[in-house]
Structures are given as structure tokens and as C-alpha cells.
Amino acid sequence: MMKTILRVLLTALAVVLLSKILPGVAVEGYVSAIIVAVVIALLRFIVKPVLVVLTIPITIITLGLFLLVINAIIILLADYFITDFVVKGFWWAFLFSLLLSFLQSILFSFLDKD
């Protein structure tokens, strides 16, 4: 349970950092960033498997690269559900999802050293 809370907080930190770096992404505050982190985690848990199953043919044809598009769609869905989180278009969501995954892998690696 503690590791899950730390993952959410680290994701929120990554969301704040990326919103400061990327001009096409904005989050209002730290509480909103935590909400964004929770919503993205829920969307990845609930919606992403459905999208992956529905897009198996195109994912196979593109050798898995279409999964990057699905990640961008997840970010755009989070933008739709959260008013304090703004992403200005698909390409900003695409870049945000790439950088978020990269930052999460770095930050989560510190948790796995137990």
C-alpha cells in the first residue's frame, strides 16, 4: 500500500515537472497533479486494456508502436475528465506520455531497490 502511494506521489511530481517544461501542458497545482496521477493510473488500469484488445490488428501491423498512440489517448482522456489539467492537442499528449513514462521509470527505479 505504501509503495502505491509513493508511486502516485512520484507520478504527481513528474506531472508537475513536465507541466513546467512543456508549454502545451498545464496543471493548476500540486493537489491537481495528485488527482491527475490517480486518474491516469485508473485509466491505464481500466481503459487501456480495452483499447489494446480493440486495436490488436493495428498494433501488430505497427510492431507495437500504436501503443504510444493509446498512451496519448489516455492522457487526452485525463485532460477531458480533469478541469485543472490542460493538454493542447494530440502531439503534446504524445510527447507528455513519452516523457512521463521515461520519468516514471527513473523515479520508480528508486523504489525497487528495497
Image: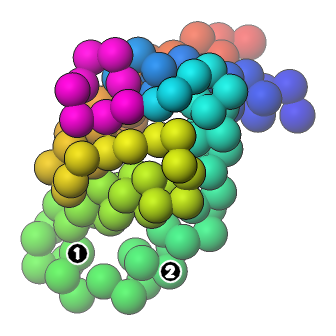
The relative height of residue 91 versus residue 108 in the rendered view (above or below) is below
Specify the amino acid type for callout 1.
Thr
Task: Identify the residue at image location x=57%, y=22%.
Answer: 29
Q: Is residue 85 visible?
A: yes
Find disc 1 in the rendering and name its residue.
Answer: 59
Q: Residues under labels 1 and 2: Cα distance?
A: 13 Å
Q: Given the current orientation, which residue lies at the most extreme left position?
A: 62
Q: Is residue 81 left or right of residue 55?
A: right
The one nearer the camera, 20 or 109, is: 20
Instruction: Give the mark nearest the N terminus, 1 or 2.
Output: 2
Circle 1 sits in a helix, a strand or a loop, which is it? helix
Please give the range of residues in magenta: 19-26
Instruction: Using the image, tell me which numbered label, if any, was put on residue 50.
Output: 2
Q: Is residue 15 left or right of residue 59?
A: right
The relative height of residue 101 versus residue 22 in the rendered view (above or below) is below
Q: Is residue 94 visible?
A: no
Q: Residue 23, image x and y in percent?
A: 21, 26
Q: Residue 17, image x and y in percent?
A: 41, 16
Circle 2 sits in a helix, a strand or a loop, which is it? helix
Q: Is residue 22 magenta?
A: yes
